[in-house]
Image (cartoon, rainbow, N blue to C red):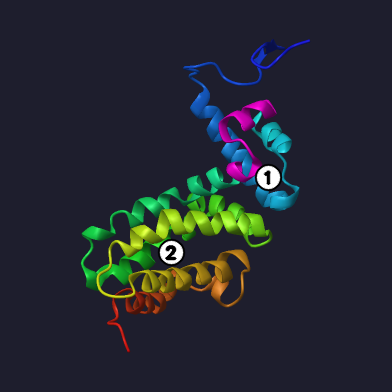
């Protein structure tokens, strides 16, 4: 009988040893498998065992690296949103009058690029169908994205203005890429940019109105 960490059929099972050079690769495979599993089966039916099978690792490794299924989902979401987080982190360098176009161009670019869109789609589809997944999605957006956008703003109601701008862009992304409502789903990206950028700019920089 073999235990965690013993060799079985030439393959190491269970928890990795300290300094394991394959650790980063295993984590990447697990997160890739998790996104595929959540996209195909939804949050409720996805299982740690199936995620491990897709990553070609022992389920004990999934628990070791991430713990619960909730944490796997959160880590997969954070990885999928990493390009967005990185782009928003550069906003303090952008002049106020260019914030709307810059944010709109960047977010549309993330969604239009298949390499960044597909991981997001896999996670968002789960988030809209399960309350636990939606709560995790909400927490990650609140913790990772909104503070970076709010930090680039001046004046009153910064949090509200940032949330309205994000709502405009996320709403568009949901209808275009997830639900695929026409004619929005097949609209030219530049035409969308021309319509969205002024609205996002208004939310981000419009003076407070009493």
Above or below, comparing residue 172 to residue 16 in the picture: below
Q: Which of marks 1 and 2 is in front?
A: 1
Name the outermost residue toward the bottom.
210
SS label for mark 1: helix
Taking 146 as reference, is 15 above or below it? Answer: above
Name which quarter of the figure residue 30 lies in.
Answer: top right
Main SS class of the magenta portion in the image: helix
Q: Position of residue 192 (x, y in %)?
A: 44, 74
Q: Nearer the viewer, residue 199 or 112?
A: 199
- At x 52%, y 67%, the residue is 173
* Residue 105 locus on image (x, y percent): 37, 65
Residue 71 drawn in magenta:
yes
Residue 142 visible in the picture: yes
Is disc 2 placed on a helix, strand or loop?
helix
Residue matched to label 2 = 108
Residue 99's spot in the image, x, y percent? 29, 68
At 56% from the left and 28% from the top, the residue drawn is 26
Residue 124 visible from this viewpoint: no
Magenta segment boundaries in residue numbering = 58-72
Residue 37, numbered label: 1
Q: Is 154 drawn above or below residue 77 in the view shown?
A: below
Reply yes or no: does residue 9 show up in magenta: no
- Placement of the C terminus among the 4 image quadrants: bottom left
Task: Tell me where residue 109 appears, x and y as whole percent.
Answer: 42, 60
The crowding category of the residue bearing disc 1, from other C-alpha atoms within 10 Å (few below 14, some 14 to 19, many at least 20), is: many
Mark identifier at residue 161: none
21 w.r.t. 165: above or below: above
Residue in the image at 32% along x and 70% along y: 101
Mark 2 surroundings within 10 Å by alpha-carbon count, few (fewer than 14), some (14 through 19), many (20 or more):
many
Where the N terminus falls, by quadrant?
A: top right
**Label 1 to label 2: alpha-carbon separation:** 25 Å
């Amino acid at each position: 009988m073999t235990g965690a960490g013993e060799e079985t059929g030439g393959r190491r099972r269970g928890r990795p040893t300290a300094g394991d050079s394959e650790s980063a690769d295993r984590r990447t495979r697990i997160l890739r498998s998790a996104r595929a599993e959540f996209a195909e089966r939804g949050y409720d039916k996805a299982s740690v065992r199936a995620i491990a099978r897709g990553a070609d690792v022992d389920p004990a490794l999934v628990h070791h690296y991430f713990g619960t299924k909730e944490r796997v989902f959160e880590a997969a979401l954070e990885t999928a949103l990493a390009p967005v987080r990185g782009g928003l982190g550069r906003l303090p360098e952008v002049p106020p009058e260019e914030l709307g176009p810059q944010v709109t161009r960047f977010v549309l670019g993330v969604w239009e690029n298949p390499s960044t869109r597909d991981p997001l789609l896999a996670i968002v589809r789960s988030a809209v169908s399960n309350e636990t997944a939606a709560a995790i999605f909400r927490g990650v957006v609140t913790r990772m994205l909104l503070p970076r956008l709010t930090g680039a703003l001046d004046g009153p109601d910064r949090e509200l203005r940032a949330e309205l701008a994000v709502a405009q862009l996320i709403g568009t992304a949901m209808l275009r890429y997830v639900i695929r409502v026409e004619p929005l789903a097949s609209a030219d990206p530049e035409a969308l940019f021309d319509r969205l950028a002024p609205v996002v700019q208004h939310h981000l920089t419009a003076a407070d109105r009493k």
